Image (cartoon, rainbow, N blue to C red):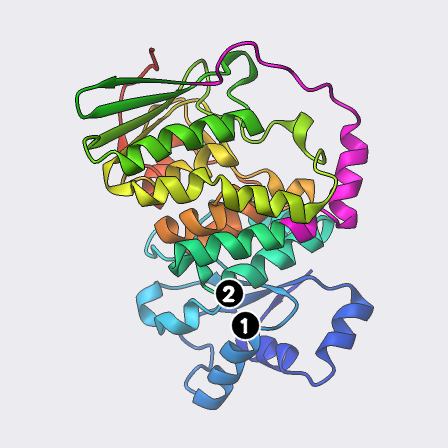
Amino acid sequence: MSILTFNEACSFVTEIALSEKLYESETSCIFVEIDPTAGIDDIDRFCSFVNHNNSVNLVIVGILNCSDEELPSNFLKSFDILLTDSRLSRLPAFVEDISIAIQELDEMISLHTQPALVLAHLLRQKAYQNVSQGLVLESLSYGMLQSGSQFKAWLNQRGDIARVLDEKPVVLASRSDESLEIYLNRPERSNAYSSDMRDQLFDFLQIARFDEAVTKVKLHGLGKSFCSGGDLAEFGSVDFPPDGHIIRMHRSPALSSHSIADKLEVYLHGVCAGAGIEIPAFASRVFGNESVEIFLPEISMGLIPGAGGTVSLPRRIGPQKTAYLAMSGKTLSLSDALAWGLIDEAVEYEPNY
């Protein structure tokens, strides 16, 4: 692994035989050093770089060594991921140690090439700008990866896990006048996001969507964590990926959350993984306490975020930070989430039904 200069990166990604070179070398990502002397005054070369970035079969990571105000924003946004160790820039993801961050990211992408490249391709399309279209493309991409070798390998490594049958409702709700409070209710499972939870949450969100008398919706998770992400026992349980896609389109808490975003508030605590941050990110206001731990585990499973995260997170924090969060496996603390904009306000909070 090496860091390329901008000119070296331009030459690399514009090679005529790039596809064959990538296939033979099994290269899945490159790291590019960016500074004001990067040579971007060569407009033709710059435009060629940006245009090739949209289709190249690589994750392209920019390492910013200056303020992001010193370079054109459309140039900076052409990278899949943008990192910096400077507090002067807000567009890139800040890391304490660039060399360690690069090494960890390179290892993750190399181990999980299929989902990493699919996520990069998906985010480049900017489908998240239209929520319904973005959710369709996310679901199609997710369904394709369910047939992938890296997801199958993860399933084999996971082994068989018995599904837990819940004897009580996995989502609760209470209403007072114009306010509806919704509670994820699998505390003994850290509110693992099961198909039953998805369906029951969808039903309550639909009430808020179509009942104009409901003007405020608050979403909580009971127990020590808001939501630990998808129920591991259910992964791989759909025999045919097209069936899963149709179900996701038919009952989508993500789309329902977006439709009531103006009146939706979410209160986060503890582990907020996968769906546990993807759905909250649609809300107009997200609150969190000191115990918050946010991460996206899907790439390590051979998948991409599939509960709306490739739409909700880019709309909040941009596609580059979304890609970094997903591909690195990084865990965000409350202070990180506040700085990134995933949480709007810190609160002292304990869920109570």
Disc 1 residue type (three-letter): Asn
Dot 2 or dot 1, earlier in sequence: 1
Q: Is residue 117 left or right of residue 296?
A: right
Question: Measuring 70% from the left and 54% from the top, which residue is drawn there?
Answer: 113
**Residue position marked by numbered label 1 in the rendering:** 54
Q: Which mark is residue 225?
A: none
Please name whichever residue, 295 or 308, is drawn nearer the observer in this view of the structure: 308
Across and down, in percent, residue 262 comes to 24, 42
Across and down, in percent, residue 39 comes to 46, 82
Res. 118 image quadrant: bottom right
Is residue 98 at all visible to an observer of this figure?
no
Q: In terms of secondary structure, where does tag 2 sit?
A: helix
Disc 2 residue type (three-letter): Arg
Question: Measuring 44% from the left and 13% from the top, which residue is drawn there?
Answer: 223
Q: Report the span colored magenta.
A: 143-171
Q: Is residue 313 left or right of residue 181?
A: right
Please name whichever residue, 202 or 307, is drawn nearer the observer in this view of the structure: 202
Q: In terms of secondary structure, where does tag 1 sit?
A: loop
Res. 209 image quadrant: top left
Q: Is residue 272 magenta?
A: no
Question: Measuring 64% from the left and 66% from the top, which residue is drawn there?
Answer: 58
Across and down, in percent, residue 200 comes to 46, 26
Question: Measuring 60% from the left and 54% from the top, which residue is drawn there?
Answer: 140
Q: Is residue 317 above or below residue 38?
A: above
| Quadrant of image for the C terminus | top left
Q: Which mark is residue 124?
A: 2
Q: Is residue 111 left or right of residue 133?
A: right
Please name whichever residue, 33 or 257, is drawn nearer the observer in this view of the structure: 257
Across and down, in percent, residue 148 comes to 75, 50
**Marks 2,1: beta carbons within 8 A:** yes
Is residue 324 at all visible to an observer of this figure?
yes
Q: Is residue 348 above or below residue 204?
A: above
